[in-house]
Image (cartoon, helix red, strand yellow):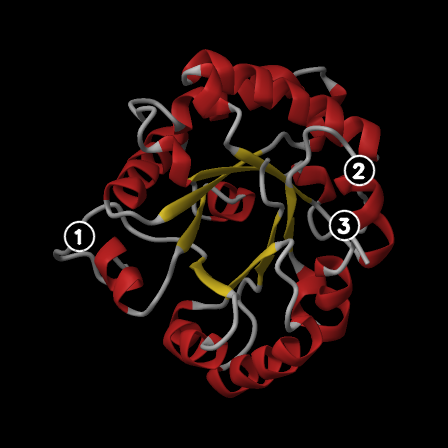
Amino acid sequence: MKTPIIIGNWKMNETVSETIRLLTELKGLISGKQEVEVVVAPPFCSLYSAEIAAQGTTIKIAAQNMHFEESGAYTGEVSPPMLIDVGCKYVILGHSERRQYFKEDDVLINKKVKAALENQLSAVLCIGETKEDRQTEKTFEVIETQLREGLRGINDSDAENLVVAYEPVWAIGTGETATPDIAEEVHAFIAEKLETIFRKDVAQTIRITYGGSVKPDNIKDLMAQAHIDGALVGGASLNAETFAKIVSYKD
């Protein structure tokens, strides 16, 4: 059985001191909760401090992005070994904001996914359609393309360190959330396609999370769906009490 995973993506928020304060508060609110894997993704400059602050807990640290090379003349970039050195266990790749604002395409994202997995970093591959895609009935076409291209060349043995995050772009930071039925329909489609990319038993171990205005009042209904294995939480993860309520959806 898959362990549900709740990932808090802090985006470009929280200084080092704010990171320590937020994690310290969060630790006190979710201590002892083992049924859900909890991951937080602070900005690069706060990763090491977050790792120190999370020690003694089951909270894992993720980066929000990375370069696919291990070193080199890439000003402003961060490599997989650098992330591992500061204690990261996960890295978020292909987030819609990276695709939209930084023009990252499937080829580049695939290089990053491969590099993460080769370095034993668990990769969270984000895929999702825009409002225009949904209105023109291209949702499943877009999802399948992003999934197949993002995972091109990934083998069965690496898939155990893979998480797929479905994040409909039209629901990110808009307050508009896909209904549980809409989310489940896409998650089921993703699960079906994963079985054509990997061996069936391997595909069935890959967690598929939902991201897009996840809040305490909708997490339980989302997680009740058969193919939703977790959540990628944005703004709601910046408040310890709110995020703890999402993590504690089973209570």
2 vs 3, front mark: 2
The image quadrant that residue 178 belongs to is top right
Kindly report the distance in space between the C-alpha atoms of the residues bearing marks 1 and 3: 36 Å
Q: Give the image location of residue 47, x and y in percent.
A: 40, 71
* Precedes in sequence: disc 2 or disc 1: 1
**In this orientation, which residue lies closer to the viewer: 27 or 213?**
27
At 34% across and 67% down in the image, what residue appears?
A: 87
* Precedes in sequence: disc 1 or disc 3: 1
* Precedes in sequence: disc 2 or disc 3: 3
Q: Give the image location of residue 57, x and y in percent.
A: 52, 72
Tag 1's secondary structure? loop
Q: Is residue 153 above or below residue 73?
A: above
Which part of the image, by quadrant, shows the C terminus? bottom right
Q: Give the image location of residue 80, x and y in percent.
A: 26, 54
Neighbor class of circle 1 (other Cα within 10 Å; few <14, some 14-19, many 20+) is few
The kind of residue on which mark 3 rests is: Thr
Q: Is residue 98 above or below residue 54?
A: above
Residue farthest along the top direction in this orientation: 196
Q: Which residue is mark 1?
A: 70
Kindly report the distance in space between the C-alpha atoms of the residues bearing marks 2 and 3: 23 Å
Q: Which residue is mark 3?
A: 174
At 72% across and 67% down in the image, what residue appears?
A: 244
Q: Give the image location of residue 159, x and y in percent.
A: 38, 31
Q: Which numbered circle lies on residue 224?
A: 2
Left/right placement of residue 55 relative to residue 250 reads left
The number of discs equals 3
2 vs 1, front mark: 2
